[in-house]
């Protein structure tokens, strides 16, 4: 059996031709949850997406912000490191700051400036012309219409002709077709503010049902139930993550997301992943916290699921 994940930096480039001509929505693609949280620290400001009770507690000082950090951090890798480790789908939560025109990644606390990471992605793509990325602008906090217009303009300025315009015929989009057209970026824009025109992909093109579960077995049941409902003419995101509520965090103030939500899911996550098959009736994008864990076990596992498409000898290009 081949090892499609032997070189995560170039895994899309190195796929067999039959997979490079397979619809993108039928490939197994690894993604990161809350991709931009790596820069969060106790020195970070509390972000507008933080639970109200946590925002109130934050006035108590650095001890509380230390706790917030432990529950807000979902990735240790920078965006650049994630790219080189095979991550090709990125989950962005974006906010502004009062009196500043900049955009920031957020998850309870403020993280890195968005523009810095967009430039990192652009640089990677210029050096890897047969790799593509999916940037999911999933949540916006505190943005007015004017801010959305600025952000849409920013994305267009950074990526330019690399952006793939929206098309409702997703079965005709393949890695090869994107490479031939020199397109490398799909931007999903999950808000439609009035008066803002953008060429990006609407939320319905990549459904991403959220389980909101804290028990691993319940999450796996949810992932299976939702996958049965998948529309196979569209992309699809399986969120393989456990989610703590504010009350759960308050009951476990001395712990962290890694110990309470990431590690307890690991065994069942890989049991579930290894039972999956991409293709016209299977998974597409799968996201996880802490994608660095276990020597990049998560991206390696997801990428190698595409071997099942080779084994099945399916003519996926005509599915």
Image (cartoon, rainbow, N blue to C red):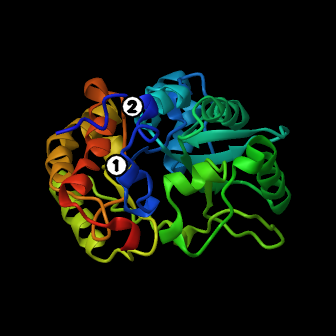
Nearer to us in this view, 238 or 7: 7
Percent of width and height locating residue 114: 68, 37
Nearer to us in this view, 305 or 53: 305
Residue drawn at x 19%, y 60% is 312
Q: Which residue is outermost to the front?
A: 17
- 10 Å neighbourhood of mark 2: few (<14), some, or many (≥20)? many
Helix, strand or loop status at disc 2: helix
**In which quarter of the view is residue 224 placed?**
bottom left
Percent of width and height locating residue 257: 34, 36
As drawn, is 139 to the left or to the right of 222? right
As drawn, is 176 to the left or to the right of 192? left
Is residue 252 shown to the viewer in this render? no
Is residue 171 shown to the viewer in this render? yes
Percent of width and height locating residue 157: 82, 45
Helix, strand or loop status at disc 1: loop
Nearer to us in this view, 249 or 285: 285
Which quarter of the figure is the N terminus placed in? top left
Q: Earlier in the sequence, mark 1 or mark 2?
A: 2
Q: Report which residue position mark 1 lands on.
A: 244
Residue drawn at x 56%, y 43% is 55
Q: Is residue 28 above or below residue 114?
A: below
């Amino acid at each position: 059996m081949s090892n499609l994940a032997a070189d995560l930096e170039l895994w899309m480039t190195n796929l067999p031709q039959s997979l490079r001509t397979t619809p993108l929505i039928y490939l197994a693609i690894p993604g990161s949850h809350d991709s931009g949280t790596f820069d969060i620290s106790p020195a970070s400001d509390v972000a507008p997406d933080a639970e109200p009770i946590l925002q109130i507690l934050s006035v108590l000082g650095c001890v509380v912000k230390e706790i917030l950090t432990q529950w807000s951090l979902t990735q240790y890798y920078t965006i650049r490191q994630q790219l080189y480790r095979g991550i090709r789908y990125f989950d962005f939560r974006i906010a502004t700051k009062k009196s500043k025109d900049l955009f920031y990644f957020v998850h309870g606390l403020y993280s890195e400036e968005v523009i810095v990471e967009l430039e990192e992605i652009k640089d990677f793509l210029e050096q890897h012309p047969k790799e593509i990325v999916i940037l999911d602008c999933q949540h916006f906090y505190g943005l007015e219409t004017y801010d959305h217009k600025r952000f849409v303009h920013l994305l267009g300025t950074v990526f330019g002709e690399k952006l793939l315009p929206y098309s409702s015929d997703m079965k005709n989009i393949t890695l090869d077709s994107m490479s031939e057209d020199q397109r490398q970026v799909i931007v999903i824009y999950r808000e439609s503010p009035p008066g803002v025109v953008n060429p990006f992909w609407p939320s319905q093109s990549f459904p991403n049902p959220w389980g909101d579960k804290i028990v691993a077995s319940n999450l796996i049941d949810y992932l299976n139930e939702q996958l049965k409902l998948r529309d196979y003419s569209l992309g699809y995101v399986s969120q393989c993550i456990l989610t703590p509520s504010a009350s759960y965090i308050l009951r476990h103030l001395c712990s962290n997301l890694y110990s309470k939500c990431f590690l307890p899911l690991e065994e069942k996550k890989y049991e579930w992943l290894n039972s999956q098959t991409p293709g016209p009736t299977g998974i597409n994008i799968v996201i996880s916290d802490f994608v660095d864990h276990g020597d990049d076990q998560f991206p390696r596992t997801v990428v190698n699921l595409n071997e099942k498409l080779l084994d099945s000898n399916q003519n996926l290009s005509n599915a």
